[in-house]
Amino acid sequence: MLDADICHAACDAKDRRFDGRFYIGVKSTGIYCRCICPARNPKRINRTFWPSAAAAEAAGFRPCLLCRPERAPGLAPIDAPARLAAAAYARIEAGALEEQGLEALAGELGVTSRHLRRVMNAQFGASPIDIAQTGRLLAARRLLNETALSVTEIAFASGFRSLRRFNATMKDRYGAPPSKMRGRKAIARGETFSVSLSPRGDYNIASIASFLRTRALPGVERGGADTYARTLKMGDTLGWIEIGMGPKGLLLTLSENLAPHLRPLVANVRGAFDLDAEMVAVDAHLASDAEFKAEVKREPGVRIPGALDGFETAIRAVLGQQVTVAGARTLTDRLVTQFGAALERGPEGLSRAFPDAASLANASADAIAKIGLPKKRAETLHRLGVAAAEGKLPLSRGAIASGRAALAEIPGIGPWTIEYVAMRALGDPDAYPATDIALINALGRKGETLDHLKPWRAYAAIRLWRRAAKKGVLS
């Protein structure tokens, strides 16, 4: 439930802490805004408050052209129902309902579709179908305003199945056809385009960039002090992305051939760079432990470096079992050289893609073992490839229960690997690989599970890994 007094105060102060937590419907204009909108604040008597963009649109409001609701950060609530709703919301924003339908999404999240609908309505004031429709429309607005793609390309990229349906829905919802909603500034078509992604609260990319740079694979990734670039395959399309800081948050640049996949890509990047984390709550919780208090004060806001590809993360986790970061990188580089596809027109330093599930499923365990692996570990990689290729390995962000269960069924996957993948790929903020040698060394004691830091133990793990790295010990 929204507290009107708090919403009014956040609106009057244009408080960034509340950005994306609610939206303001302005009765006098029929527009809905973020609380940080640069326009003059509407009179209080004209303000209505809505828990989501979908709820505001269902009430007949249209999105503001100044504050661009499609750029608002998402939510990372603490309690279980809100976590479920947020995970479902993120998956819907990434196009899950178009890919698999509501029943399959609910199963992936470990609940019934009826329960999921009830939770979504309670949390966001809108049904999953309404949220999906609003997500498609806002994705289309972003593409219309930030790219030179044709209207037809935008229709399919944003999740509509026909141009006619796209035109009709845009006109019905926003009062104008897509062709009339282009930004005033003409955008020239080129080989790349960029979109900005707003984080929740203050954001410093340095800690995540450092983590990724240390583990970067030659030809696949390129890391800098505050940038990260990599090749990426989405569907049958192989392209590349680059991420760095821009004037309005994170700036995502991508090869234009990935434009049809912008909607899931934006969701993946938001998760991988932990843009929606409630870091004030996380840091306050960690600082309650003397082990982390000084560290949090000295370096607040250390976020979890997630993953852009869950399958890749699982493969790399298996390759990293019982070896150093450098050793794992060597083995992974050999795997990429042997089974990865070449990127024909990539920027400097990006020339190969990480092997997809089909490549490893079609290879024998003996062929995989030739990169220098024990036979049993090669068999584990092959089983991962087969499970993923057959659609039996749900490793999307939010699929915490089903992803963990699927990993546990594969011989050769132990607790460390499950916790590591849950942390980085599934988005479990409480994942904690307690047997990790670097964590043990950083804590100075063995067998510690840090149960008192639930539900944010993954953030404790990241801080401990950073502490270990400064001592020259990497996991």
Image (spheres, rainbow, N blue to C red):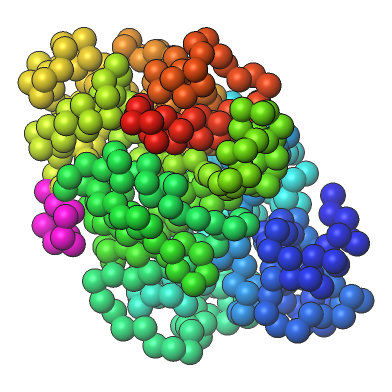
Q: Is residue 217 left or right of residue 115?
A: left
Residue toward you, 207 or 264 = 207
Q: Residue at x 57, y 65 (%)?
A: 70
**210 drawn magenta:** no
Q: Is residue 86 left or right of residue 470?
A: right
Q: Residue at x 26, y 20 (%)?
A: 323
Residue toward you, 264 or 36 = 36
Q: Residue at x 25, y 52 (%)?
A: 222
- Where residue 167 sits: x, y (%)? 50, 74
- Where residue 183 sits: x, y (%)? 48, 84
What is the span of residues highlighted in magenta in the rendered image?
Answer: 342-351
Q: Quadrant of residue 245?
A: bottom left
- Where residue 91 sits: x, y (%)? 53, 44
Q: Is residue 349 visible?
A: yes
Rendered view: 230 above or below 320: below
**346 drawn magenta:** yes
- Where residue 413 sits: x, y (%)? 36, 15
Residue toward you, 372 or 394 = 372
Q: Residue at x 10, y 16 (%)?
A: 366
- Magenta: main secondary structure equals loop
Q: Quadrant of residue 272?
A: top left
Quadrant placement of the C terminus: top left
Residue toward you, 329 or 474 = 474
